[in-house]
């Protein structure tokens, strides 16, 4: 039986997240592989991959906060808000030369906190059943609705003014659904010179860090986190007795046990250390929102 668990992969540039899934399928000899949180081909960094039964955990990873390291180039706007698109606007050199670190900081401050953000038109968001980027590539005009996101940190780590351009290295902590390309675009627009993303690397997803990730070259020898170990880092832990584990696995409720759960959901861990599933409140009871097959690692 193929290993089950959560694998942290350092995605290289130039390939899709689906390409990483395909490579993982071959390495582990199973079709049942998925990922949480797509990275564009240009982007690199942490991709959380689920194998076998652990794919059931991915839905609880998708909404986790994330950290990115990125480079924003001010002075140029592109069709995709990143370096893979065509340049559609070049700011006058004098406009870029007039920028100051203080003005840049003010622009970044306005994009920090709870903000309203319009995703990039080439995002994977579906519009009437089709991905926005597919519609754009087909020559259609796409307008996406603004959404509320939270940018808890937007910090400049280095800035490099140049001839008609100004590059910023930044670190961003943000809620799920935040588009770093859109931050680059909106910062450039606010400063009147346009902007786009030239590099993007995801370094954290929830409690998972890039320092734990394996390269594609090391996939075949990688040891995934067990479902219990991974779930314990995704959700609060609720220890259950052996008999409670049996009941939960059979779809039964734990009557009158609502008081034991101090969050919306928790990972139910059996006495043998295995993951029973994810539990939530139902009235005064606890009930499984997701069950893990018995015997899954």
Image (spheres, grey):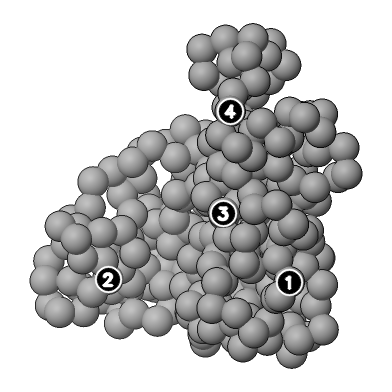
Residue name at image x 76 percent, y 86 percent: 220
Q: Quadrant of residue 45?
A: bottom right
Give the residue number, with chain letter if any, for mark 4.
252
Give the residue number, with chain letter if any, for mark 1.
3
Name the residue nearer the viewer: 230 or 198.
230
Q: 231 above or below 185?
A: above
Distance of label 2 from label 1 (alpha carbons): 35 Å
Distance of label 3 from label 4 (alpha carbons): 19 Å
Tag 4–tag 1 contact (CB < 8 Å)? no
44 displayed left or right of 82? right
Tag 3–tag 4 contact (CB < 8 Å)? no
Residue name at image x 55 percent, y 72 percent: 32
Residue name at image x 11 percent, y 71 percent: 140
261 displayed left or right of 92? right
Name the residue nearer the viewer: 41 or 69.
41
Residue 63: x and y in percent read: 53, 45
The earlier-in-sequence mark between 3 and 4 is 3
């Amino acid at each position: 039986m193929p290993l089950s668990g959560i694998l942290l992969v350092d995605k290289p540039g130039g390939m899709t997240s689906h390409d990483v899934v395909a490579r993982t399928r071959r390495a582990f000899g199973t079709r049942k592989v998925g990922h949480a949180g797509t990275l564009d081909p240009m982007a690199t960094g942490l991709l959380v991959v689920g194998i076998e039964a652990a794919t059931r955990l991915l839905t609880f990873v998708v909404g986790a906060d994330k950290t990115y390291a990125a480079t924003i180039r001010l002075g140029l706007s592109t069709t995709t808000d990143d370096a893979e698109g065509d340049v559609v606007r070049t700011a006058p050199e004098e406009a870029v030369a007039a920028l100051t670190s203080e003005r840049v900081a003010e622009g970044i401050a306005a994009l920090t906190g709870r903000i309203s953000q319009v995703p990039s038109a080439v995002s994977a968001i579906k519009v009437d059943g089709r991905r926005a980027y597919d519609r754009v590539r087909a020559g259609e005009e796409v307008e996406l609705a603004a959404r509320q996101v939270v940018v808890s940190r937007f910090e400049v780590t280095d800035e490099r003014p140049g001839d008609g351009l100004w590059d910023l290295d930044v670190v961003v902590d943000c809620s799920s659904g935040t588009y770093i390309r859109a931050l680059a675009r909106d910062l450039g627009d606010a400063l009147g010179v346009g902007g786009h993303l030239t590099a993007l690397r995801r370094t954290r997803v929830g409690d998972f860090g890039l320092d734990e990730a394996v390269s594609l070259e090391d996939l075949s020898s990688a040891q995934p986190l067990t479902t219990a170990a991974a779930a314990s880092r995704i959700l609060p832990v609720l220890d259950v007795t052996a008999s409670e584990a049996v009941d939960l696995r059979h779809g039964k409720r734990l009557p009158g046990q609502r008081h034991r759960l101090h969050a919306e959901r928790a990972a139910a861990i059996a006495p043998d250390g295995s993951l029973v599933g994810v539990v939530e409140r139902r009235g005064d009871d606890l009930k499984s929102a997701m069950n893990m097959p018995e015997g899954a690692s």
